[in-house]
Image (spheres, grey):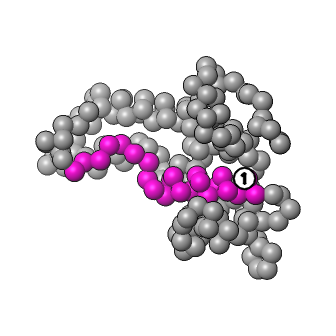
C-alpha cells in the first residue's frame, strides 16, 4: 500500500474513465435488440454521459473492431462480433492500450539516459506478470457473461473456473 504521507495525492492503480465508460457503452450495444442499431443519444442517455463523449468512445470502439456503425436515418451501432466473442480485455486494448508496454522502461530511466535496470529488472518481470494476470481475468469474461445482475455476476466470478451458469431468465 502506498504511504499517504509520502505520496498524498497518488491514486491507487485504476482503470481509466474511458475504459469504464467504454465497457458500459458496449454493454448497452450488446443489450440492445438486434432489430435496429442503437444510437449515440440512446447510449449516452442510458449511461448518463454526454453525447459528445459517448461519440468519442464509440468511434474508438469502432476503430478497435468491437462495433460496426451505420450512418444516416436508422443508423447507429451494433456489435462487430457476437457478445460471447468480446471481452473486457478487448475493450481495454481498444481504449487504453496495454497495461505494460515495451516502451515503459524507456520512459522511466530516472535522471539517466537509460534505466540502470535495463538488462536485469525484477520490477519489469512483476509488471509483465500483473498484465498477464489482468489479461487472464478480463479475457475470460465476455459481454454475454456480463448480462447478469450484479449479485449473479459476483457469484459467477468467485466460482472456480468460472463455470458457465444458466442464462438469466428471459434469455
Q: Residue at x 78, y 35 (%)?
A: 167
Examine the residues drawn in magenta and state their main secondary structure: helix
Is 145 positioned to the left or the right of 90 in the image? right
Q: Between residue 13 and residue 65, name the one nearer to us.
A: 13
Q: Residue 11: within the magenta?
A: yes
Is 113 positioned to the left or the right of 93 in the image? left
Q: Which residue is label 1 attached to?
A: 30
The quarter of the image holding the C terminus is top right
The quarter of the image holding the N terminus is top left
On the image, which quarter does residue 52 sit in? Answer: bottom right
Q: Residue at x 54, y 71 (%)?
A: 50
* Residue 142 showing in the rendered view: no
* Residue 127 showing in the rendered view: yes
Residue 137, x across and y down, in percent: 55, 32
On the image, which quarter does residue 105 sit in? Answer: top left
Q: Residue at x 58, y 32 (%)?
A: 154
Magenta span covers which residues? 9-32
Residue 62, x across and y down, in percent: 65, 62
Residue 111, x across and y down, in percent: 14, 49
**Helix, strand or loop for disc 1:** helix
Residue 42, x across and y down, in percent: 68, 68
Name above or below for residue 64 compared with residue 86: below
Which residue reaches farthest right?
35
Name above or below for residue 105 compared with residue 34: above
Q: Residue at x 47, y 46 (%)?
A: 98
Is 65 positioned to the left or the right of 137 in the image? right
Amino acid at each position: 500500500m502506498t504511504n499517504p504521507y509520502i505520496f498524498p495525492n497518488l491514486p491507487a492503480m485504476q482503470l481509466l474513465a474511458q475504459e469504464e465508460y467504454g465497457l458500459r457503452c458496449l454493454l448497452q450495444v450488446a443489450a440492445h435488440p438486434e432489430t435496429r442499431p442503437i444510437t449515440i443519444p440512446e447510449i449516452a442517455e442510458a449511461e448518463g454521459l454526454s453525447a459528445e463523449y459517448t461519440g468519442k468512445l464509440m468511434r474508438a470502439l469502432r476503430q478497435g473492431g468491437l462495433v460496426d456503425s451505420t450512418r444516416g436515418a436508422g443508423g447507429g451501432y451494433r456489435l462487430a462480433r457476437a457478445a460471447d466473442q468480446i471481452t473486457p480485455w478487448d475493450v481495454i486494448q481498444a481504449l487504453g492500450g496495454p497495461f505494460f508496454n515495451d516502451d515503459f522502461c524507456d520512459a522511466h530511466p530516472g535522471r539517466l539516459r537509460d534505466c540502470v535496470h535495463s538488462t536485469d529488472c525484477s520490477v519489469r518481470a512483476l509488471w509483465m506478470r500483473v498484465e498477464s494476470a489482468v489479461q487472464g481475468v478480463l479475457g475470460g469474461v465476455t459481454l454475454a457473461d456480463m448480462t447478469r445482475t450484479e449479485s449473479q455476476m459476483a457469484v459467477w466470478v468467485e466460482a472456480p473456473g468460472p463455470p458457465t451458469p444458466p442464462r438469466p431468465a428471459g434469455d
